[in-house]
Amino acid sequence: MATTTGITWNEGQPLEEDALRSLEARVESLLARMTLEEKIALVHGDSKFSTAPIPRLGIPRRWLTDGPHGVRQEVGPHTWTPAGRTDDFSTYMPVDVCLAATWNPGLAEEYGAVLGEEARARGKHVLLGPGVNVMRTPLNGRNFEYFGEDPHLASRMVVGYIRGVQSQQVAACVKHFAANNQEHERTTIDVRMDDRTLREIYLPAFKAAVQEAGVWTVMGAYNKFRGQYCCHNDFLLNAVLKREWGFEGLVVSDWAGAHDTDEAVRCGLDLEMGTEKPYPDYYLSTPFLEGIRSGKYPEELLDDKARRNLRVMIATGALDGREPGFLNTSDHQETARRVAEEGIVLLKNEGGLLPLDCAKTKSIAVIGQNAILKFAAGGDSAGVKAFYEVTALEGIVGRAGEKVNVCFSLGYAPDGGAELIERAVEAARQADVVILVAGLNHDKPYDTEGADRPDMKLPFGQDALIQKVVEANPRTIVANVSGAPVDMEAWFDRIPAVLQAWYAGMEGGAALARVLFGDVNPSGKLPCTFPRRLEDSPAHALDAYPGRDGVTVYEEGLFVGYRWFDAKEIAPRLPFGHGLSYTAFAYENLRLAEADGRVTVRFDLVNAGGREGAEVAQVYVEDVAPRLPRPLRELKAFQKVLLGPGERRTVTLDLEPEAFAFFDPEQNAWVAEPGEFRIHVGGSSRDLRLTESYRAQRGK
Ligand code: GLC
C-alpha cells in the first residue's frame, strides 16, 4: 500500500493505491480546468478564516478555525470581533499541556477525534492545532497550548492527536513551524540555533506530525529563523519540510505572518491568511497574479500551491460533502473528563492527607479565586465559547455531598485587599481540611498568547496567603491551576499535599474533585521541569532569553529542560516525568535483548499498594562516552500501565536504532554509533529505579 507522505485519512491508515491515484487524478483534473484567477483564489484568504468559493468547479468556501483544545467561536467575518452568534458553542477540552501530562497517546487520539467531530459539526475543514513548540522557558505565555519540554513525549502525543482529528475528515494543522518558543517580540524576533539543536529538539514533533501522522497542514510561525520569516522560509519549508520530509499538504501562514510576495511565492507558502491588507492586495493575490502574467513567476509555482490546497480540500470532503458532525455529546464530555483526570499530577502527598474521606471530613474550606474562575474563553486564539465549565468549587461541592459543609473564601484577587487573607485564614481555621486553588489565569501577562510572564511568581499575594492558611490549618491541600511551572519555594515544603491541575477543560472541576476524593487514582506526570528558581532554567541561566536587538540565540543548545538540570546537576523543585499515585509501584528484573540494532527492554512493574493505579514507566537512554556532547539521559520510550492491587506485569518496550542516534552536523545526518549505553527505567527523570548497560556494536 503506497502512501504519499502527508495525505492519509481513513482513521489515519494509509490510502490504498487506487484511492491515492483517484485523489491525485481529481486534483489534476480540477487544476487543468482552473483559470489563473481561480488558482489564485485558492492560495489566500477572503475573510478572517475562509477562502473564496469557486462555484463553477463545485469548490465551496473553505473554512479554517482555531484552536488546539476546542473549536473557536465565530468572528468577523472580516474582523476579530466575535460575531455574537448563538450556534458557535463548543466543547472546551483540557489544554494541550494537560493532555501531554496524561502521557497517553491513545487518549490523545480520542481527544483529537472529539475536536475533529466538533469542527465538522461547525462546518470547518482545517483545525488550527496542535501547537507543539518546545517549552524552552517557563515564561512563554503559550506554554499551556503546547506539549512541554521533551521532543519524544511531544512527538508521541501529537501523532495521536492528529490521527484523531483527521479520522473525522478534518485537517489538523501542526504549529508554529518553527522555533516559536516565546511571545516576546514574536512577530519579528529572529531565532538562531545550531543544526543539532534544531534537529534533536525543535523539529522532531513536527517531523512525527508529517511522517507518522500524515498531517495535512502546517502553520508557519510568526518569527524569523536564521534571518527569514518562517511563513516563507526556504530552508524550513522547501528544503526540510517538503523535500526532505516529503510533505504534500499545505503550509498556511500564521495570521499576518506573510510579509513579501517574492518570498511567499518561492519559499514554500501555500495559503496566506490574516494579512492586514485588503484581500486583493495580499502578497499571494494580485501581486502574485501579475507576477505570473509578466513572466516573473512560472505558473508551475502557483500550480504546486493550488495542488496542495486541492489535496487538502478533497481529503476533508470539501468537494463531496461529509457526514454531519456532533457537538458536546456525552462521549465528548466523558473524554474531556478522562483527559483531565489523567492529566492532573499529584506532586506531593505527605501523611496520606489525600484522598479525602467524606466519612471523616465534616467541613472543607475552599479558598482561591481560581476555584471559581472559568478559563475556557481565555488565552486569545485558543479561547472557546464553552457550553459549560465545571469550576473547582462546583466540582468539590458536588462531590462532597450533603453531609460535608463546604465554605468558600476568595483569598486573593487581582485587585487585592488584605482583608481577603484574613477572611481566608479564618475560614481555614474553622475547617477540617483546606483546598486552596492557586495559580495563574489567562489575563496578560500570565498564561496567554501575545505575552510572556515577567517571572515564575504566583501573583496577587498568593505566597503569603498560602503560608498563613497552612499556619492556621496544617491540613491544607494546594491545587495549582496554570499552564506552566510556577515558583512554589515559599510554601511547598510546608504543604502536605500539592497537585498540578492545569486548565483542565469544561469538566476540570469535576475531575479535580474525583481525584481529591479518590474516585480516581491520579496518574499524571509532569511534561516539564518545575525549577526552584527561574535562573536555574537554561535560557535564563545563560541570559539567552528573550534575546536582544531583535535576535535570540538558543545558547543552551540541546540542553533544554531536564537535559540542562541533569548536565549541571541542579536539583529542580519537581523533575520532568514526576507524578505520584495513591498506590506505589515497584520496578524489578530489567533485562535487555538486541536484534538487528533494536534493543528490547523488558522489566516487571508491580503495583505494591492496595488500590488500582496507572504508572507511566519511562525509559531514558544514556550514551556513556559520546563523540559529541550529549545530554546525560534522554527520554526514548514510555508506557502507561494500569495495574490492580498487587498485580505484576512484564512491560516490553522496543528501542529502535534511532533511540541511540544523534544528529551529526558534519554528515548532516542522524548517526547511531557503536559504544556503551546505559538504559534507565523508572517513574520520572530523577526516579530511575533500574539500570542496565548495553554495548552497541553497529555503526554508520
Ligand atoms: C494567531 C496564532 C495562531 C492562530 C492564528 C489564527 O495569532 O498565533 O496560533 O491559529 O493566529 O487565530
Image: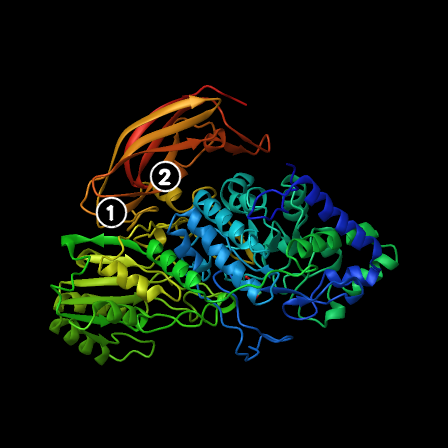
According to the picture, the residue beneath numbered tag 2 turns out to be 567
Q: Residue furthest front?
A: 323
Which residue in the protein does label 1 denote?
612
Assign a secondary structure to mark 2: helix
Q: Are marks 1 and 2 in contact (CB under 8 Å)?
A: no
Residue at horizontal 16 percent and vertical 61 percent from the top: 357
In primary-sequence order, the first of circles 1 and 2 is: 2
Q: At which x and y percent is residue 445? A: 43, 68
Q: In this orientation, does residue 489 appear?
A: no
At x 27%, y 54%, the residue is: 346
Given residues 441 and 95, the one toward you in this image is 95
Q: Is mark 1 within 8 Å of ligand 1?
A: no
Q: Mark 1, residues whose alpha carbon is within 10 Å: few (<14), some, or many (≥20)? A: some
Q: Is residue 421 above or below residue 682?
A: below
Ligand 1 - quadrant of the structure image: bottom right
Q: Secondary structure at mark 1?
A: loop
User: Is 555 situated left or right of 5 in this image?
Assistant: left
Q: How many marks?
A: 2
Q: Quadrant of residue 639?
A: top left
